[in-house]
Amino acid sequence: MYNANYFKARLTSSVVVGSKNGATLSVVYVEETKKVHHWELFLDGELIDKYYVEKTAKLMFRDFSGS
């Protein structure tokens, strides 16, 4: 059965946090609650990995971006 409330709560948005040397870090959060769901690391437009810990995501971005 279709439940509109379930799907409404699962809508997410993505915001780019940093971009350098082809590496891009973005944060994905739930629209309704504005809480962070996970972090995504892209390299030249390809998804490398998803991280659920902010510190790990930022460290990996720093490694891939070369800074």
Image (cartoon, rainbow, N blue to C red):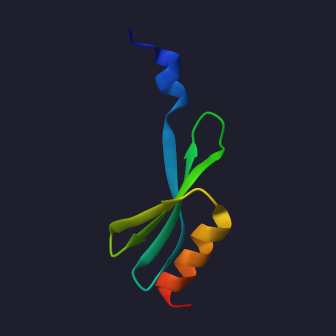
Q: Is residue 48 left or right of residue 64?
A: left
Foreground pick, 15 / 58:
58
Residue 9 lies, in percent from the top left, at 55, 28
Q: Look at 50% across and 46% down and name the residue there.
A: 13
Decide: is 59 above or below 31.
below
Residue 19 at x, y = what percent?
49, 76
**Count of labels shown?**
0
Q: Which residue is drawn at the image coordinates 51% and 21% (left, top)?
A: 6
Q: Quadrant of residue 51?
A: bottom right
**Residue 47 to residue 62: above or below:** above
Q: Out of 12 and 40, give the one closest to the viewer.
A: 40
Quadrant in the picture for the C terminus = bottom right
Quadrant where the N terminus is found in the figure: top left
Name, please, the residue furthest toward the top: 1
Instruction: Please determine whether, in this image, residue 52 is positioned above or below residue 4.
Output: below
Residue at image coords 46%, 72%: 24
Q: Which residue in the rendered view is the most extreme toward the bottom? A: 67
- Give the quadrant of residue 32: top right
